[in-house]
Image (cartoon, helix red, strand yellow):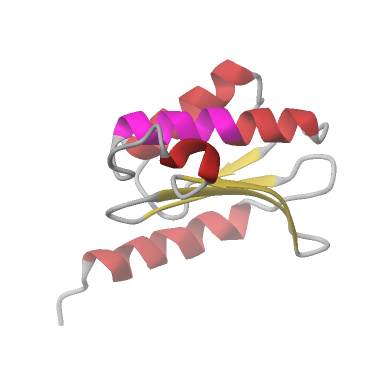
């Protein structure tokens, strides 16, 4: 039986999550991209608590973005999540690509977050 793209992504994500763990001093920046939107959140895995979140559905970005599933919108989400993290005092994170290949929208989000000042 042939595996679907979603099954392969989930398999890669399990492999990534074995190695990537968010601590209070260095939380996990988790990214998920659907066809129409991209979501990012910073998570402390010990508490199981989301510290900061941003997506293309946020009120701040909704008017600026025409379509949430492209590289331009991913850059804006990356900038927004980094700004919110800096306001909370988070400077260093561990990047969790969510099983997606580090390419395109995922890479654009990560690069934008780095430009604002987050360290991976």
Q: Residue furthest left?
A: 2
**Image height of 11 relative to 35, above or below:** below
Q: Residue furthest front?
A: 63
* Magenta highlight on residue 72: yes
Q: Total marks drawn?
A: 0
x 29%, y 67%: residue = 6
* Magenta highlight on residue 76: yes
Q: Looking at the image, which is closer to me, 59 or 120?
A: 59
What is the quadrant of the C terminus in the image? top right
Q: Residue 58, how many percent across, how many down?
A: 52, 46
Q: Quadrant of residue 75?
A: top left
Q: Looking at the image, which is closer to me, 21 or 67?
A: 67
- Left or right of 58 on screen, residue 92: right
Which residues fall within the magenta stretch? 71-80
Q: Quadrant of residue 47?
A: bottom right
x 30%, y 45%: residue = 69
What is the quadrant of the N terminus in the image? bottom left
x 51%, y 54%: residue = 16
Q: Looking at the image, which is closer to me, 11 or 91?
A: 91
Q: Residue 101, how many percent across, how many down?
A: 34, 45
Q: Residue 74, how many percent across, how many down?
A: 40, 36
Q: Residue 106, how many percent across, how many down?
A: 40, 39
x 46%, y 50%: residue = 57
Residue 103 appearing in the image: no
**Main secondary structure of the magenta stretch:** helix
Residue 6 appearing in the image: yes
């Amino acid at each position: 039986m042939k595996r679907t793209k979603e099954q392969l992504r989930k398999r890669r994500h399990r492999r990534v999550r074995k190695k990537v763990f968010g601590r209070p001093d260095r939380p996990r920046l988790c990214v998920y991209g659907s066809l129409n939107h991209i979501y990012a959140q910073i998570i402390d895995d010990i508490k199981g608590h989301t510290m900061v979140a941003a997506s293309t559905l946020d009120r701040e970005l909704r008017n600026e973005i025409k379509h949430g599933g492209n590289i331009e919108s991913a850059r804006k989400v990356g900038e927004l999540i980094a700004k919110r993290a800096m306001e909370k005092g988070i400077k260093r994170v561990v990047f969790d690509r969510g099983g997606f290949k580090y390419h395109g929208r995922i890479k654009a989000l990560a690069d934008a977050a780095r430009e604002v000042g987050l360290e991976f």
